[in-house]
Every structure is written in C-alpha cells, then in structure tokens.
Image (cartoon, grey):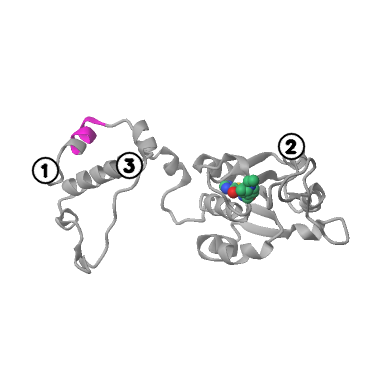
Amino acid sequence: MIFDILTIFPGMFHGPLSESIVGKAQARGLVFVRVHNLRDYAVDRHQMTDDRPFGGGEGMVMKPEPIVHALEAIAPLGPPPRVVLLSPQGRVFEQATARRYSGLERLVLICGRYEGVDERVARYFVDEEISIGDFILTGGELAAMVVVDAVTRLIPGVLGNEASAEAESFREPILEHPQYTRPQEFRGYRVPEVLLSGDHRRIARWRRRQALLRTRERRPDLFARLSLSEEDRELLSRPEDAL
Ligand code: 9D3
C-alpha cells in the first residue's frame, strides 16, 4: 500500500512513521509512505501556500494551486489513488474507515493548515474529507499519521498472526478487562487474587464483569448498544466476591 502525504511540514512525519510497527512495515516493503512538500509545488516566486480569505475574516486559507499541482505531479507515481483531505469539516474517521482504506492500493492524504483549504479543492479534487474527532488540532499532519497507523496495522502481514482485521470487525464493541503482570505486589498494590487462583471459570467471569462495569462507566454509548446475556446481567448485579 502506498501513502502519499501532501503537507507544508514534511519534517513532522520522519520520526513517528519510521518507528515501531509502521517503520517495520515500511522496511519490509509492505507499505510505502512518501511525504511531499507542498511548498515545492507553489506557483509564485515566494512559494506561497496560503492567502487571505475572500470576503474577509481572520486567518489564512490554503491556496488551491500548490495542492492541485502536487496531485497532478504525483498522479503517475503509482495506481490511481483515493484522495482524502484531513479537515475538521470531515466525516469522523473510525475503524470501518480504516478497514475500507486498508483494501486500497494507494491513498493520498492532504494535510490542511491555517483556517482551512480553498473549498474548490475539497469539492472538485478530493474524494472524501475526514476528521479524526471532535477536538482542535493545529493542522492535519497528526491526523494523517493517525490514519497511516490505523490503516497500516490492518494490512496483511504487518502484524503477526494475532487479531486479523476480519476478527476485529466481528468482536463485541466492549472495553477490555484490566490486565496485570509481574510482580504480584508493586508498591504495596496487589494483583487481584482471582487472577492467581488458577480457577479459569472464575477468572473468565471476573474479566467479563470488569469489562462490563468499565464499559458502563466509561463508554455509556457502547454499553447502551450491548445485548447482555442472562449471565451478564447476573454478573453485574452480583457483588464481586460472590463470583
Ligand atoms: C476558527 C476556527 N478554526 C480554528 C479554531 C477552525 C480550525 C481550522 C483548522 C480548527 C482546526 C484546524 C486544523 N485542524 C485540522 O486540520 C484537522 C483536524 C482537527 O483539528 N481535529 C480533528 N481532526 C482533524 S483532521 C484535520
């Protein structure tokens, strides 16, 4: 899979995408991340990528020419890409979006800056506009890295044999139970006794109860959509030591 990233801050990408799983996937030739400096595609002698908004107002708007010239220049460098604009005005990126992108051969990610991108780019040169959530970033670069990370781990061969993209899509939308590892006691805090008991039925019930409790507490939106079994209801109504 090829990612082409258009940005005025190419240096932001070098660290994060060379480390860890994405770095290894690149080293193994499973993904290619190419970062293109929009300033190189500017048309005027000052290499301007932004300008003042028509109609007046605060801040600056990204000019259309550098973005469209960059799209045209990189078009021949691979199969026809899907072109995505990162912007607060987009549909929210979720796991289903990542899954859909992971099946593509090539994705172009355009990182907006300032108050946004000239609307003609969004309307006529972009296939879809996405946001990574309801919080304010300083630009689309970190959002693009989030997309690269979420999509890369779904590409066959990138992760080990664990958790295929397929399996994840059929998993119940519930938070995970708490995890503990050695030592049994850390700064006076002990691992829950049930996990050391060797009683696998009891451990499974404890974990299920913890997952349900924390989903109800932290993600009421997910909890409301769960279809609880009779045993789930019983686990929730019973005190912990009666497991
Ligand atoms: C006048 C209001 N503007 C500043 C507060 C709006 C605004 C413009 C540009 C807010 C953020 C940005 C830069 N953000 C992105 O380009 C962006 C983003 C985000 O801010 N949140 C979540 N996802 C994304 S994707 C791109």
Q: Callout 2: helix, strand or loop?
A: helix
Is residue 232 on the magenta stretch? yes
Q: Nearer the viewer, residue 10 or 33?
A: 10
Percent of width and height locating residue 184: 20, 65
Q: Callout 3: helix, strand or loop?
A: helix
* Secondary structure predominantly adopted by residues drawn in magenta: helix
Q: Callout 1: helix, strand or loop?
A: helix
Percent of width and height locating residue 215: 32, 42
Q: CA distance from mark 3 to mark 2?
A: 39 Å
Disc 3 marks which residue?
215
User: Viewed as shown, does residue 82 lie left or right of 196?
Assistant: right
Q: Are marks 1 and 2 in contact (CB under 8 Å)?
A: no
Query: Above or below — where is 4 with respect to 165?
Result: below
Disc 2 marks which residue?
123
First in residue order: circle 3 vs circle 1: 3
Q: Which numbered circle lies on residue 139?
A: none
Magenta span of residues:
229-235
Q: Nearer the viewer, residue 242 or 29?
A: 242
Occupied quadrant, residue 192: bottom left
Give the residue displayed 34% in from the left and 36% down from the top.
Answer: 223
- Residue found at the far front of this picture: 57
User: Viewed as shown, does residue 90 lie left or right of 223?
Assistant: right
Q: Amino acid at mark 2?
A: Arg
Counting other residues with Cα less than 10 Å from the Cα at mark 1, is it few (<14), some (14-19), or many (20 or more)?
few
Q: Amino acid at mark 1?
A: Ala
First in residue order: circle 3 vs circle 2: 2
